[in-house]
Image: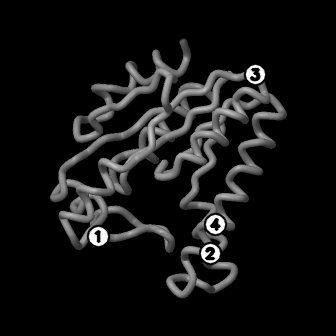
Amino acid sequence: MFFLQMSGFPGSGKSTLAQLLARRTGAVIVDHDVVKSALMEFMEIQAVDAKTAGKISYGIDWSLIDFHLSIGHAVIFDSPCLYAEMLGKGMRLAEKYNVKYKYVECYLNDFEKINERLKNRNPKISQIQEVLSEKIFSVAVDSSEKPLNVEHLIIDSGKPVDSYIDEVLDYILK
């Protein structure tokens, strides 16, 4: 059993990869965008207070992850990993339930390709639809937190998912 923490800029392919991995492993996905969007729709706060919605939805995410791990499910957490405390929470939960902690970053440092993907997807209410500044994009892409002293995998998600799915499966299942 494992707990996989996904990371990557919006549009980098995290959800696509998470869904393929879940189908092949039987893992449960906790998708931050699903939780945050549902909260925003229910509370009708949309852009007015998206920061608060984000904080509340992360609390819900962690509760769901804890629950699913507690009943023996492998879990994939589909969320940008921008904060060190997220890594700590993930590693503590993996240790609490004696499961393997895994971290995969979908890395795509291509402003044009990211914007193309964002514009062509059917966005949830909490998701961005475009990156307006190449400078902000570059800083954000390089600011994802990575676990120290823990083996992790960074994949080039600009390539077709079929070219790296087996590598990711090998990593999370070993």
Label disc, if present, on residue 122 of the rendered structure = none
Of marks 1 and 4, the one in the foreground: 4
**Labelled pair 4, 2 in contact (Cβ < 8 Å):** yes
Is residue 11 shown above or below 43?
above
Residue annotated with mark 1: 130
Alpha carbon of mark 4 to alpha carbon of mark 3: how far? 27 Å
**Mark 1 / mark 4, whichever is N-terminal:** 4
Mark 2 nearby-residue class (10 Å; few <14, some 14–19, many ≥20): few
- Element assignment for label 2: helix
Give amino acid for label 4: Lys
At 76% from the left and 34% from the top, the residue drawn is 69
Residue under circle 3?
A: 98
Which secondary structure, mark 3? loop
Q: CA distance from mark 3 to mark 2?
A: 32 Å
Tell me how far mark 4 sits from mark 2, CA to CA.
Answer: 5 Å
Location of mark 4 (residue):
55
**Marked residue nearer the N-terminal end (1 or 2):** 2
**Label 4 neighbour load within 10 Å: few <14, some 14-19, many 20+:** few
Q: In which quarter of the view is residue 162 placed? A: top left
| Tag 1: amino acid | Glu
Nearer the observer, disc 1 or disc 2?
2
- Position of residue 64 in the picture relative to residue 152 (left or right): right
Q: Quadrant of residue 168?
A: top left
The percent coordinates of residue 158 (x first, y second) are 23, 41
From what the image shows, is residue 140 above or below residue 18? below
- Name the secondary structure under disc 1: loop
Residue 141, above or below 162: below
Residue at the spot of label 2: 52
Residue in the picture at 63% in, 48% down: 30
Mark 4 secondary-structure assignment:
helix
Kind of residue at disc 3: Asn
Closer to the eye: label 1 or 3: 3
